[in-house]
Amino acid sequence: MTAKENMEKIFRHEKPDWIPHLGSEAYGIRDYIVERPIMTTGYDAWGCHWISCADSLNITHPDTSDIKFDDVTQWREKVVFPDLDKIDFTPMEEEAKAFTDRDSRMLQYVSLNGIFERTHILMGFENALCEIITEPEEYGAFLAAIADHKIRLFQKVYDICQPDILVYHDDMAIQTGPYFAPDLYKKYLFPQYKRIVDAAREMGYKYVVHHSCGKVDSLIPDWISCGFDGWDSVMQCNDLVQVKKDFGDRIVFMPGLDTQRILGPKESTRDDIEKMVVEWMEMLAGDGTGLIIDSTVAYSLNPKNEEICLGSIQKHGRAFMDAKKAGKAYHV
């Protein structure tokens, strides 16, 4: 069985032959539109300035002094949407042509900075949160316009390289809960999400995955209603046991594992990491279904732990599934 066939089984909520590591077993096409500069200070395709952080391997964050406007009613005059016809997608075309093992591995496209994230990158975080409350209809129109742009982009990308998986990034919460009240998500965010998923599916993307950090377990039913096939990030601040119990047959978990307590700290041992890998396999695939372990930037903050973690996934992924298919418990 190929890595692609194994992953197809997981998305169909069948028992795979092994628990895979996404970064090793699928190929990720780069985001050539530049939704954010990677590892360097600079500007994105929207003209927003980003600053790299030397203390975290130059991961970038928005320059909070570079706010384009603070009144959402001004978005039509202030926002310059990237002109997709003027972006050079030739490198993406060349990279897609160089990916020659489509029969054995999936191709995924990761789209950074979703519709909500783009509003607060342009307006500033506090301004965006205030405006969705004080000017909800205008804010909703702004979200819809960004969604229109995203849909055009996803069509462009699909025409070039036909990815199997679209990973849509849009962080929805902090580690204690969502950013704003549920009715605002339901009225203004989720209808746009459904439009994006429906359009992507019509284009030909097989699977659409929502990436969101934070405590978003209360939003999972709505994501499923929008049509998302998977959830990427899957932070430990969520009640993951309950989410697996309630929704494990409808959404695939794609976690970066315990990045904060185990993978981040330099003092974590090989035994700590190996034990964590198996515990997460048991927690999110105890029934033998629904888990693809993702690679995250948090791993790269500690290359030693990243290497140990990858080795642990490869060591236990198949043995774990062999035990589950045989109806046996699995231990490190």
Image: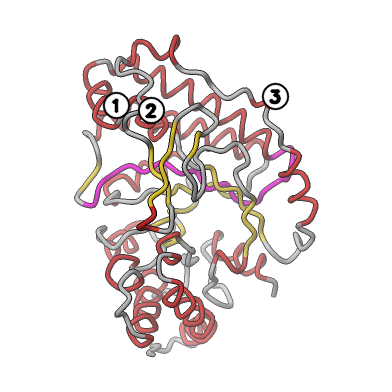
Quadrant location, the N terminus: bottom right
Amino acid type for the residue under numbered disc 2: Thr
Q: Is residue 164 magenta?
A: yes
Query: Foreground: 324 or 256?
Result: 256
Instruction: Report helix, strand or loop for mark 1.
Output: helix
Q: Residue at x 32, y 29 (%)?
A: 65
Amino acid type for the residue under numbered disc 3: Asp
* Residue underneath mark 2: 119
Q: Quadrant of residue 86?
A: top right
Colour basis:
secondary structure
Neighbourhood count class around disc 2 (C-alpha, 10 Å): few under 14, some 14–19, many 20 upward: many
Q: Earlier in the sequence, mark 1 or mark 2?
A: 2
Specify whether 210 is left or right of 199: left
* Residue underneath mark 3: 85
- Tell me where residue 272 appears, x and y as whole percent: 32, 83
Instruction: Report helix, strand or loop for mark 2.
Output: helix
User: Rounded to the nearest whole Å, what is the CA distance between mark 1 and mark 2?
Assistant: 6 Å
Q: Earlier in the sequence, mark 3 or mark 1?
A: 3
Query: Foreground: 36 or 100?
Result: 36
> Compared to 42, does 191 lie above or below?
above
Q: Earlier in the sequence, mark 2 or mark 3?
A: 3
Neighbourhood count class around disc 1 (C-alpha, 10 Å): few under 14, some 14–19, many 20 upward: many
Contact flag, marks 1 and 2 (Cβ < 8 Å): yes
Q: Residue at x 31, y 80 (%)?
A: 268
The stretch of residues the image draws in magenta is: 158-175
Residue 128's mark? 1
Query: Foreground: 288 or 34?
Result: 34
- Tell me where residue 75 appears, x and y as whole percent: 40, 14
Specify whether 286 is left or right of 101: left
